[in-house]
Image: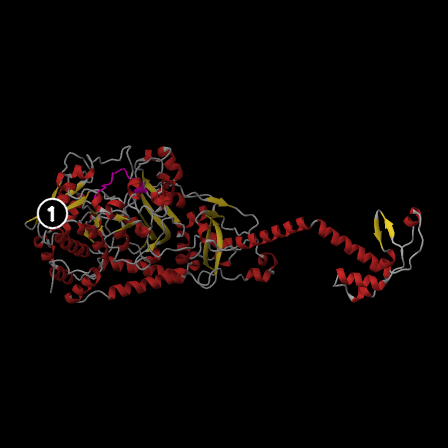
Amino acid sequence: MDAIKEDGLTTDANKAYGGVGDAGPKSLSQQAFKAPPPFNPQHRQHEQARFFPGVSDYEKAGDPSSAIMLSRRRGSVVGFVRRHSGYIFMFTVLFMFMQLGFHNGQKHHPQMQNMVVRDPEDTWTTSPSSILSPPEEEKKRKSVIAEHPIPGLMEEAELKYRKKLGGQSKTLKAAVAEYRRRYKRAPPKGFDDWWAFTQKYDVKMIDEYDGLIEDLKPFWDLSGEEIRRRAAQVGELPSIDLVRIRDGMATVINVNPNFHDSEVSARARGFKSMIGKFMTTLPDMDFPINAKAEGRVLVPWEHRKYPNLTLQDSSKGVQAMLGGPFKPDWGDDGNVWEAWRRTCSPDSSARRLLSSLRANANVPVKNHLASKDLSPGSDFSFVETTSSSEDYCETPYAHYTQGHFFSDWRSIPVLYPVFSPAKARGFMDIRIPSHYYYGSTKRYTYGWDSVNLELNEIDVMEVPWEEKIDKIFWRGATTGGGSHPPGFAPQYQRHRFLRMASDTSNASKVITFADPPTAGVHWVSAAVPIGTLNEEIMDAAFVKSVSANSYPGGQKALEADHRFGDSVPLGRHWAYKYLIDMDGMSYSGRFMAFLASDSVPIKSTVYDEFFTDWIQPWVHFIPLSSSYKEIYNIHAYFSGATQSTLRAVNSTSAELPPDQRRSIEGDKRLRRIARAGKRWKQTIGRTLDMEAYVYRLCLEWARLWADDRDSMNFSL
């Protein structure tokens, strides 16, 4: 057969179409208008089978014209795919990445929670159930939590405390054995006399002195002679008094009378009173007592790790040890934070300058496409204990929230023995009981009758539990830090709490509560304006401005940003169920009074005190994080949801009287904490227990004071 040439291409038309060829040459016009060869269905099916193996039997059985159109359409699709395959591939890859991104965006990323503050109503995508669920399911929402964590925290804490209290040594022999087991050395000389003292006055805590031993541990590296020299030298510094024991008699000495301090000798006189019952049995020694509430001793990490790098012989005097005269105020040449961060290891974040200065900025994010189904959120997180163990070496940006890092008082960069009422992490002071706890004053002592000068077991202003106001109460001054460097007062602990508690805005807090309140089985979450919550459950105010000029904008700005109220007597606190206990310049001196009352202390602190090993959070008080954010949910558990919270979820319980909205189980647990705290103060937080602690401290200090420490050991 002849081949037909079209546009320079030679094709075998007869073979292509299976028809009879037309012999002989044709003109171009004849070729152009030549009728197509007859259609061969079998050949077309063969071609379809090659390129489209999935062709159905129906298509194979169809009429020829339909098959031709279908073939042409498929050919055009294949051509389109071939021409645009690159674009199609890129679109497919992009689509897959978008799907993976949305999927991962809904996962839980705990590290991101600290970086971004999200609106309580936010979730990244709208829940299909919120769109498709029928009305009856909306009325019967599932509980947002299986069980509330607070009962578990209380039960675990109670088990720990019962085990600790029940495991105390019952005999002198057992106490000696336990001492050796814990500290790998013999008890100090006079341990038997101390044991007799504890038995005489029914002291419960016999073995729990780990904090005391930890405070004294660095001084074991110094000789007795060196300790005696350093104790005398540090007494020369401002705001340090000496309690000196000579021949069984104690006196208070102020070696530096040229420096005027309003607090001079108050804590030293308190310490002298604490040793009154047993000072005749003690050897000669000195106790340098801190006249300030703030910690004093901050020794750089390198000096502790490699003491040979520093001067260890103090025989040349205190100025040689400190590298010059000691200035009590920081002035313009440093601050507490710069000294504190040097107590961290060199590989910590605090030692990297930029990390130590970075502020903790939270950026609110609002997602208007979010589901209305709320989850408890970050405000529904409860701490097991206080913030005294918070590691600012690894989270240096958080130091802006604590006023003690901005104290005006210069710290001491050498290991000098200084006895202080409290100790924050990083400081090397030695803890002693506060004179506020030991003495009796109308500002700090529960049951003190300032008219008859006697201590009553029940304060005359005490209120029965059923009549207490179901609110969170606090009154205090604007203390909390200094101004080195200036400008950071708004972030100090008291200022932050007061701004939160006096906020009148519509910013939301997510509250998780039982609905109905009396059941404690079904839990729901609701976003409630913080202004409404504060009106319902908060009663907090400053009553006095201290150093108002250190606050940006002065007194006017301070009053504009915080609620101020009138001063109240200590007894006014007992009218409320919840009492906030916050740090000021240092520890809070009212904590023992709060424990002695029939109310419940909610304590937030970064300090450890002498009793830290003796008391149990969630048994004797409620611990509160340094952010305070969970306090609204604490109240919601123990006291039940407020009326505005119930209305936020259209609960029928919202219109019930307050006593019927109260959580019965929560109120029982709250009262149990109040009773346990009061019982602790009556049995373990007595002045006699403080004396037992100081007695044990004196024995340990006497051994360190001696040249021959082995001669100061006790053995049965």
Q: Give the number of callouts.
A: 1
* Front in this rendered view, residue 32 or 255: 32
Give the overall secondary structure of the magenta segment.
loop
Tell me where residue 201 sits by quadrant.
Answer: bottom left
Answer yes or no: is residue 248 visible.
yes
* Lateral position of residue 98 relative to residue 680, left or right: right
Question: In what quadrant of the picture does the N terminus appear?
Answer: bottom right
Tell me where residue 351 sits by quadrant.
Answer: top left
* Front in this rendered view, residue 591 or 35: 35
Answer yes or no: is residue 479 visible.
no
Report the residue at 39% width, 63% height from top.
Answer: 665
Q: Is residue 419 magenta?
A: no
Residues in magenta, as a range: 403-414
Q: Position of residue 598 (x, y in %)?
A: 29, 56
* Lateral position of residue 20 relative to residue 500, left or right: right
Residue topped by disc 1: 225
